[in-house]
Amino acid sequence: MIFLETFPEFPESNYFHEKGLAMSAITRVETELIRVPLARTYKGSFYQMTHRSTVLLRVFTDDGAMGEAYVGDEDAGLSEIDSIIHEEIAPRLFGHDAQAIEKCWEIARPATWNILRDRRLGLVASAAFDTALWDLMGRTLNIPLWKLWGGYRDAVPVISIGGYYNSNLTIEDEIKYLQDKQFAGMKFKVGGLSPAEDAKRVQLARSVAGPDFKIAVDANQGWDIESAVTFAKLVEDQDIMWFEEPCHWENDRRAMRDVRFRSGIAVCAGQTEMSAAGCRDLMEVAAIDYCNFDSSWSGGPTEWLRAAAVAATYGVKMAHHEEAQVSAHLIASQSHGTFIEFFHPDRDPIWHNMIANAAPLKNGYMALPTGPGLGWELDRDYISKYRINERSTQS
């Protein structure tokens, strides 16, 4: 008979100190808001961007430990996220054990319950804490997060997001650039023109790229069902890896299911979901083959890992919307993880400049950092140059 070791009722007892598991209480939080102008305005099907912005958060404990992470790309609302961090979440977390990550996630959750503001703002604020606390855990245990979360692989394939309508590069030049940089492929923007016009753009991309270059397409919810099906059939011989968010948002779960069943194309979605339960519902109605849930838009890696567990039961593969600084670790950790994605340096100057030690791509893959936690070395001079605000709150 096996007897399970029982724990005393109070977590600060001598038992935990003797085991080296003494509580590491959260005492201080610091943030820096970073906003970088883009080289030009980037236009997708129905959106455009002029800046890349993010919040960098550091969390400190009473024993001198520190975790650090940057999350999100919200431009409008950046200051409100910062206020939620310091005025709503931090006061609730002060004094709690930084290593009790599930509990801290739960304590932060009320920041998402205000029905009179964009729920995404509270989710990004929560994700900043969740990611930083995971970084702290990895540093404490002296292990990289990709290994702590599962350690399935130590390098990940990378695709770039491109094919923007107003690009300063031709399709031919953009693909040549990506191949020269050894990307495994690209996610190509569609949905802003007619299905026939966008199909011609994709056909050109494939003719230039050749058969070994991965091509996914992303309509950013730009089409109705009939248009999406028409496009999918026009490109059915172009070896498209996935068709991302093909349909308008109003009834997109059933719409994507219909596109998937009627055309036979693999469908990807999840970035606009705010919870693992939302991802589950996509899988339950057979709407997707790939789930590109965004941990920074949904409360943090804790929730992404829950979605990944559900996806494994449905035979759905996991991707991640942007945010390579955390997605690389998440995708690498899972057996059903696929590709990470990031942009041309002009589209995401933060990833390409603030991360000082990202490994160069080799044959389509990027090696994961081996340092503890997230393992990224941040360029403090770059942060200082584009910092628009900094703030500290302590218990």
Image: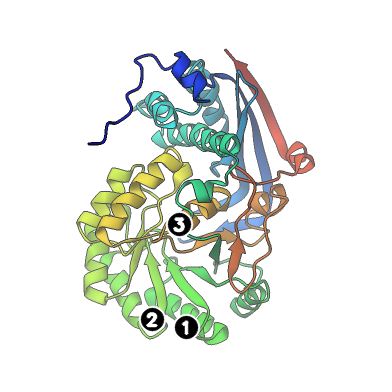
Q: For residue 367, say whether it is visible.
A: yes
Q: Which mark is residue 235?
A: 2
Element carrying mark 2: loop
Pointer 1 with pointer 3, Cβ within 8 A: no
Label 3: which residue? 46
Label 1: which residue? 203
**Callout 2: few (<14), some (14-19), or many (20+) C-alpha neighbours within 10 Å?**
some
> Residue 80's x, y, as percent?
53, 28
Q: Amino acid type of disc 3?
A: Phe
Q: Amino acid type of disc 2?
A: Val
- Quick one: 346 or 139, which is closer to the camera? 139
> Residue 70's x, y, as percent?
59, 40
Distance from Cα at disc 2 to Cα at disc 3 = 22 Å
Pick the quarter of the image with the N terminus.
Answer: top left
Q: Which residue shows up at 58% across the image and 49% down it?
A: 325
Pointer 1 with pointer 2, Cβ within 8 A: yes
Distance from Cα at disc 1 to Cα at disc 3 = 22 Å
Element carrying mark 1: helix
Q: For residue 160, say whether it is visible.
A: no
